[in-house]
């Protein structure tokens, strides 16, 4: 049953209570710093730039004292989808979408409708590197910050918009927190459903050569009860909030008061300088 151990490979939404400099940062500044790094990852189109960003993200994992193997474990469930996307990008990416002058892409394989070029290979590799970096950053954010701290940080960041434009800052923070909180819960529920169906003789495509295709076809009988369970949990959550007389919006007070330190400003400044350095550097390839 090791192939059904899904929750152990879900890092987004988990929290590790460790004593590290990243854990001690103010959630508001931590969100801003991670957003800057995510923007740098998104807009870096070169091999060397993504290699530098991957090294920076790996250094953050070490500073946060999170086991590196655990930080990368969230990649395992998404690995088949990532490989499929890479194959599609390499096979169907055309030179018309490439930056630069025409003819910059060199053909590597031209077979019927499959056209693999150096540009498509670069796109696939850079996209894969971005995916790994974004997954590690998102996982690191939730591994070093509790859901309550994330909710307070998001609400305080958007509170100026709420005061001036009536922006629903509290509701947005609540939705984000609930979504992050239920990621490991749904992973545990999916694991329980899969084990229950296998114990009743269901074939989820764990054997054979084309395991990925078989597993994809077998997802439908698993997703239906998973969605039904999600709707039941949502209804229970609504009833629990109504029973506690929950009222969102303006006028709510806060028991937790966030206070910034010089380390928080240094973290944002360091993230900004790193992002500017990576994005402004003319990487040769």
Image (cartoon, rainbow, N blue to C red):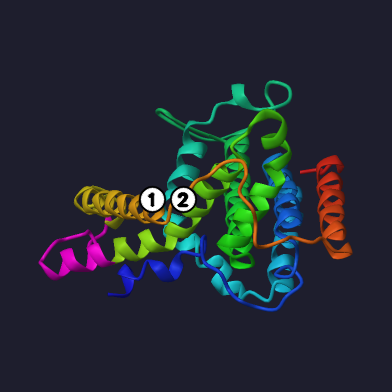
List x then y, in percent, for residue 198.
17, 67
Please count the marks in the image. Answer: 2
List x then y, in percent, for residue 15.
56, 69
Residue lying at the far left in this picture: please name it: 201
List x then y, in percent, for residue 164.
72, 31
Left or right position of 89 against 67: left
Q: Quadrant of residue 153?
A: bottom right
Q: Nearer the viewer, residue 208 or 55?
A: 55
Left or right position of 197 against 58: left
Q: What's the residue at 44%, 58% (across, down)?
A: 183
Left or right position of 75 against 5: right
The magenta segment: 192-210
Give above or below for 56 relative to 32: below
Give above or below for 168 relative to 157: above
SS label for mark 2: loop
Q: CA distance from mark 2 to mark 1?
A: 6 Å
Question: Would residue 206 be visible to someone looking at this image?
Answer: no
Q: Quadrant of residue 190?
A: bottom left
Q: Residues within 10 Å of mark 2 (few under 14, many from 20)?
A: few
Question: Would residue 102 be visible to someone looking at this image?
Answer: yes
Q: Inspect the magenta stretch and tell me whether residue 258 lies in it.
A: no
List x then y, in percent, for residue 150.
62, 57
Q: State the residue position of label 1.
A: 242
Q: Inspect the magenta stretch and tell me whether residue 193 lies in it.
A: yes
The quarter in which the N terminus is drawn is bottom left
Q: State the residue position of label 2.
A: 246
The quarter in which the C terminus is drawn is top right
Q: Residues within 10 Å of mark 1 (few under 14, many from 20)?
A: few
Q: Nearer the viewer, residue 60 or 218?
A: 60
Do callouts 2 and 1 mark residues in contact (Cβ within 8 Å)?
Answer: yes
Q: What's the residue at 46%, 50% (across, down)?
A: 246
Give above or below for 184 relative to 241: below
């Amino acid at each position: 049953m090791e192939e059904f151990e899904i929750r152990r490979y879900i890092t987004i939404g988990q929290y590790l209570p460790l004593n590290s400099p990243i854990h001690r940062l103010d959630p508001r500044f931590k969100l801003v710093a991670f957003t800057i790094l995510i923007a740098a990852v998104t807009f870096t189109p070169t091999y060397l730039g993504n290699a530098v960003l991957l090294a920076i993200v790996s250094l953050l994992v070490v500073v946060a004292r999170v086991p590196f193997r655990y930080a990368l474990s969230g990649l395992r469930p998404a690995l088949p989808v990532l490989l499929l996307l890479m194959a599609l990008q390499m096979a169907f990416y055309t030179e018309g979408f490439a930056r630069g002058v025409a003819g910059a892409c060199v053909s590597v394989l031209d077979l019927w409708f499959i056209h693999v070029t150096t540009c498509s290979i670069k796109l696939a590799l850079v996209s894969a590197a971005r995916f790994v970096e974004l997954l590690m950053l998102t996982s690191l954010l939730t591994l070093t910050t509790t859901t309550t701290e994330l909710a307070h940080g998001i609400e305080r960041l958007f509170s100026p918009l709420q005061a001036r434009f009536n922006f629903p800052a509290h509701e947005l923070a609540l939705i984000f927190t609930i979504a992050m909180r239920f990621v490991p819960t749904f992973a545990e529920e999916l694991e329980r459903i899969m084990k229950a169906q296998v114990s009743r003789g269901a074939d989820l495509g764990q054997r054979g050569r084309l395991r990925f295709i078989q597993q994809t076809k077998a997802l439908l009988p698993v997703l239906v009860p998973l969605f039904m369970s999600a709707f039941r949990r949502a209804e229970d959550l609504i009833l629990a909030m109504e029973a506690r007389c929950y009222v969102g919006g303006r006028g709510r007070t806060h028991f937790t008061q966030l206070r910034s330190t010089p380390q928080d400003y240094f973290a944002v400044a360091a993230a900004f300088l790193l992002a500017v350095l990576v994005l402004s550097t003319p990487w040769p390839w």
